[in-house]
Each structure stands twice: as structure tokens, then as C-alpha cells.
Image: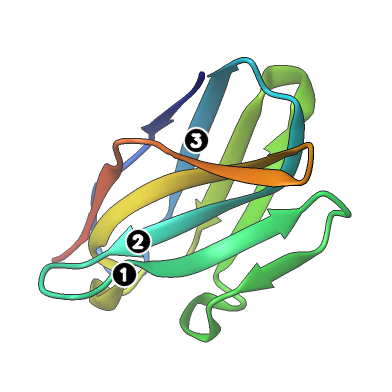
Amino acid sequence: QVQLVESGGGLVQPGGSLRLSCARSGAIFSIFAMGWYRQAPGKQRELVADINRSGRTDYLDAVKGRFTISGDNAKNTMYLQMNNLIPEDTAIYYCNVVTERDNTRTAYWGRGTQVTVSS
């Protein structure tokens, strides 16, 4: 089983920055993609940023230019650098990893970390 643990969330003022981390452990074969999702109160979970095994990244339009997704394979850790935060970024942020084995893809989720942007 794959375990994902997020950290780095918290309360920050508008314009501030946070860096989220997602540490993964367990039996990981081939990673198809990794990403960060978020869910605000009363809203559906949405994809914030992801990176595929080719290294290509994609971002939600609302965070382009402010957020950066990256990974450190040596540390089995994925990051989300969030700059110039705005109140609309307030949400629970979830780490997601999709593995692929024998043409079967499996998605794993962390429990989430709260990000609150408020003055």
C-alpha cells in the first residue's frame, strides 16, 4: 500500500507564501502522475497542479504564475510552492499519486492539510 502524508498548511495573510509537502511511502511501482487537489467548503474537489512521469506540469488557471509543483524522488516527496496567496485559495489541500502497473492505474490520496488565507 502507498501512504501519503501532507504537511505545511496553516494560516497565512493575503500575499503570503506556504510550501506544502507530500511524503510518500510504501510499495510504489510506476508512478503515472502526481498532483495536488483542493476542496473549499461547499465546493467540489478540484485539481490545482499535477506532474506526469514525463515531467510535464499543468496548473489550474487560477493559480498559474503563483503556484509551482515539484518533486524530489530521492526524498520521495512532492511539493507545492504557493506564493501571493489570496483568500480564494483557502481550502483543504490533498496530495494524489496515480500508479500504473499491468495497464491498471490506482489512485492514492493523503488526508489533506488545511490552508487558510485571511487577514
Q: Which sits in the foreground, 19 or 38?
A: 38
**Looking at the rendering, in which quadrant would you find the C terminus?**
bottom left
Left or right of 16? Residue 70 is right
Q: Amino acid at mark 1?
A: Asp
- Cα separation, mark 1 vs mark 3, equals 17 Å
Which sits earlier in the primary sequence, circle 2 or circle 1?
A: 2
Which sits earlier in the primary sequence, circle 1 or circle 3?
A: 3
Left or right of 58? Residue 46 is left
Element at label 1 = helix
Element at label 2 = strand
Mark 2 vs 1: CB contact within 8 A: yes
- Cα separation, mark 3 vs mark 2, equals 14 Å
User: Where does the image place residue 74, in percent across and percent down from the top left?
Assistant: 78, 19
Element at label 3 = strand
Which sits earlier in the primary sequence, circle 3 or circle 2?
A: 3
On the question of residue 96 being in view, the answer is yes
Left or right of 55? Residue 75 is left
Q: Which sits in the foreground, 85 or 54?
A: 54
Q: Nearer the viewer, mark 3 or mark 2?
A: 2
Q: Nearer the viewer, mark 2 or mark 1?
A: 2
Q: Which residue is mark 1?
A: 89
